[in-house]
């Protein structure tokens, strides 16, 4: 689960991390009120959406008058911001963050991620912070500094000092950097975050370090024990299909293909997507129905997958252990009947009660395409797709 910049800064403020004075608003009048309350002569108006690259897309503006605060806030709120992460459809801006502007001397990048290779939290830093950090990582990876953290002892001072020195934070800035890194780490660990990022961490006029932008992502599976974090979830920033799926206990992620996938188990779902790609296709989604899938749950999976107008065929791949093939088959037939599905459906069943499941499909009044294994299922899905392609008659030769 992702949260907005202003929410991340509120969290970091609770841990003593220095962030600019500011507040989120929903109208231009509120923006003026906050700017006047903050005081000063320059302010930053920042669109709040779940996306990076807002600055390059025009979602971050520095203004030097109250009239400009009003005008820019009014312009941003309700607009659709398109960044390199949102896709061409963009995201609607429902709120903006008004902050006191700072005079920046130099920018750095500090982040904490979970490294799957080492299975540990890793501190990542660079002397090249700001809007082009992705380009820095791609073109000059040697400028990205990494430090693996032992979970038994946590982040130690010497590790922070080592990283800070390597990116150029020395002298009076060194103890400030150590405090910020350690507090960021504690905030991440205390709240079951999977990523915490400060970009940029800036030296401002006066020689102080200040967090000018930050973001955090959290483990969905831990939200039940983090109610305060769960309340920060913004459903407007998520795919409605993914929100509905989570309400039914389904794990769904929309993709850009045309083969809908309904699978049990995350690993098998990934393998199914790989098999479709191997056979020249493109999966339309990742969908894991999980263990103990009831017929109603399977029917809900169909409804969510079919909300995507790009889906032209559905591949169902079930290897039942905790699940039962007869439950899955009953749900499939129920969905076919209730949702009046006409497109080709490829089904591969294996495992618990597989014969009972196949019998249910065989007695249903629908031309299911039965597959014997995963490779066969992917091949038949592509064959079904090709059969739907319009047939173009060859041009007849004309005699002149």
Image: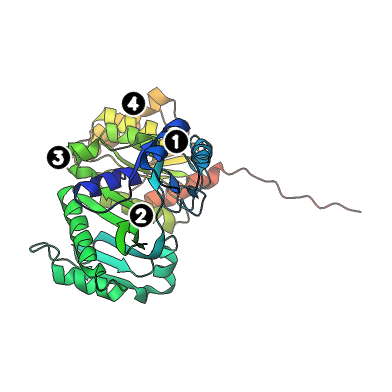
Q: Which colour style is shown?
A: rainbow
Secondary element at tag 2 = loop
Pair 1/2: label in front: 1
Judge by depth and name the residue closer to the eye, 38 or 393: 38
Q: Is residue 35 above or below residue 201?
A: above
Pair 4/2: label in front: 2
Q: Are marks 3 and 1 in contact (CB under 8 Å)?
A: no
Quadrant (top left/top right/bottom left/bottom right) for the C terminus: bottom right
Secondary element at tag 4 = helix
Q: CA distance from mark 4 to mark 2?
A: 53 Å
> How many numbered marks have been drawn onto this rendered protein structure?
4
Q: Residues within 10 Å of mark 2 (few under 14, many from 20)?
A: many
- Give the residue at mark 3: 225
Q: CA distance from mark 1 to mark 2?
A: 21 Å
Instruction: Return the x and y of residue 24 as percentages of the image width and height.
Output: 37, 38
- Give the residue at mark 1: 32
Tell me the number on the disc at residue 262: none
Q: Is residue 112 above or below residue 64?
A: below
Secondary element at tag 3 = helix
Q: Earlier in the sequence, mark 1 or mark 4?
A: 1
């Amino acid at each position: 689960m992702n949260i907005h910049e202003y929410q991340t800064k509120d969290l970091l403020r609770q841990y003593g991390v220095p962030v600019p004075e500011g507040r989120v608003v929903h109208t231009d009048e509120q923006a003026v009120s906050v700017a006047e309350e903050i005081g000063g002569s320059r302010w930053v108006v920042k669109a709040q959406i779940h996306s990076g690259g807002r600055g390059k897309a025009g979602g971050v503006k520095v203004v030097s008058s109250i009239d400009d605060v009003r005008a820019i806030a009014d312009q941003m709120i309700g607009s659709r911001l398109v960044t390199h992460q949102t896709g061409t459809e963009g995201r609607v801006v429902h709120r903006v963050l008004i902050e006191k502007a700072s005079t920046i001397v130099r920018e750095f990048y500090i982040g904490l991620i979970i490294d799957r290779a080492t299975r540990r939290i890793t501190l990542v830093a660079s002397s090249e912070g700001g809007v082009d950090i992705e380009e820095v990582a791609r073109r000059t990876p040697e400028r990205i500094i990494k430090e693996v953290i032992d979970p038994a002892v946590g982040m130690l001072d010497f590790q922070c000092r080592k990283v800070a020195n390597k990116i150029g934070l020395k002298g009076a800035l060194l103890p400030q950097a150590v405090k910020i890194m350690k507090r960021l780490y504690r905030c991440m660990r205390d709240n079951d975050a999977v990523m915490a990022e400060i970009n940029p961490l800036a030296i401002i006029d006066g020689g102080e370090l200040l967090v000018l932008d930050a973001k955090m992502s959290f483990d969905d599976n831990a939200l039940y024990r983090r109610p305060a974090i769960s309340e920060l979830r913004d459903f407007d920033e998520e795919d409605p299909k993914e929100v509905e799926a989570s309400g039914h206990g389904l794990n769904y992620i929309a993709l850009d293909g045309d083969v809908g996938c309904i699978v049990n188990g995350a690993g098998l779902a990934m393998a199914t997507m790989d098999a479709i790609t191997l056979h020249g296709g493109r999966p339309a989604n990742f969908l894991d129905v999980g263990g103990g899938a009831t017929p109603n749950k399977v029917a809900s999976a169909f409804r969510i997958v079919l909300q995507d107008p790009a889906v032209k065929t559905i591949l169902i791949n079930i290897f039942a252990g905790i699940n039962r093939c007869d439950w899955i088959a009953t749900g499939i037939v129920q969905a076919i009947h209730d949702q009046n599905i006409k497109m080709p459906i490829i089904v591969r069943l294996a495992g618990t009660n597989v014969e009972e499941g196949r019998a249910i499909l065989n007695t249903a009044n629908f031309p299911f395409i039965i597959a014997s294994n995963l490779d066969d299922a992917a091949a038949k899905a592509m064959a079904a797709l090709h059969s739907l392609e319009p047939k173009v008659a060859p041009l007849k030769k004309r005699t002149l």
